[in-house]
Image (tube, rainbow, N blue to C red):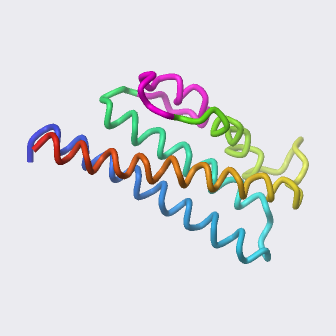
């Protein structure tokens, strides 16, 4: 396996984790029996991991951060990354730890439902891009 194939393989590994988070968010949202914060957290994680997959594909080192805007800004302008993904950043911490943040409401969960769709569109675009890149690099 050459270096280009290893890069694509690593990007696809990040994408697999993103897909698992997307699946978890969808299932939790459909179940309506769990706390909305879990949907929020998995949505944020899916977006973060998809962005990191794109950065791996581009060969761009990234910091250990949950800041989706910072990650998005590392990508070249040619990558179509929607700004509203950055709105999920706060859920990386707010949804995981009790503290100074209020519990997400049903309205928050409804907003996150939209974000899950945005993340899913971005995920599938990235999935097609990695497949295309793998074919071009052979």
> How many labels were placed on the picture?
0
Residue 104 is situated, as x and y percent measured from the top left of the image, at: 85, 54
Residue 84 is situated, as x and y percent measured from the top left of the image, at: 67, 37
Query: Which region shows up in magenta?
Result: 62-80
Q: Residue sitting at 40 percent across and 58 percent down?
A: 16
Q: Nearer the viewer, residue 25 or 123?
A: 123
Q: Main secondary structure of the magenta part?
A: loop
Q: Is residue 82 above or below residue 99?
A: above
Quarter of the image with the C terminus in it: top left
Q: Residue sitting at 51 percent across and 33 percent down?
A: 64
Q: Is residue 121 above or below residue 64?
A: below
Residue 68 is situated, as x and y percent measured from the top left of the image, at: 59, 34
Task: Please state if 81 lies on the left or on the right of 116 as rendered.
Answer: left
Magenta span includes 71: yes
Residue 33 is situated, as x and y percent measured from the top left of the image, at: 79, 77
Q: Residue sitting at 63 percent across and 53 percent down?
A: 43
Q: In this view, does 31 lie above or below 61?
A: below
Task: Please state if 78 lies on the left or on the right of 12 as rendered.
Answer: right
Q: Residue sitting at 71 percent across and 74 percent down?
A: 30
Magenta span includes 82: no
């Amino acid at each position: 396996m050459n270096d280009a194939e290893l890069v694509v393989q690593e990007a696809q590994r990040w994408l697999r984790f993103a897909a698992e988070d997307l699946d978890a968010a969808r299932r939790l949202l459909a179940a309506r029996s769990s706390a909305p914060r879990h949907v929020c957290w998995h949505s944020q994680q899916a977006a973060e991991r998809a962005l990191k997959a794109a950065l791996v594909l581009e060969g761009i080192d990234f910091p250990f951060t949950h800041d989706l805007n910072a990650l998005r800004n590392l990508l070249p302008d040619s990558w179509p990354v929607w700004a509203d993904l950055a709105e999920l950043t706060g859920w990386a911490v707010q949804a995981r730890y009790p503290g100074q943040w209020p519990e997400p409401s049903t309205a928050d969960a409804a907003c996150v439902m939209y974000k899950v769709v945005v993340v899913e569109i971005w995920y599938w675009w990235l999935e097609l891009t990695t497949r295309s890149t793998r074919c071009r690099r052979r």
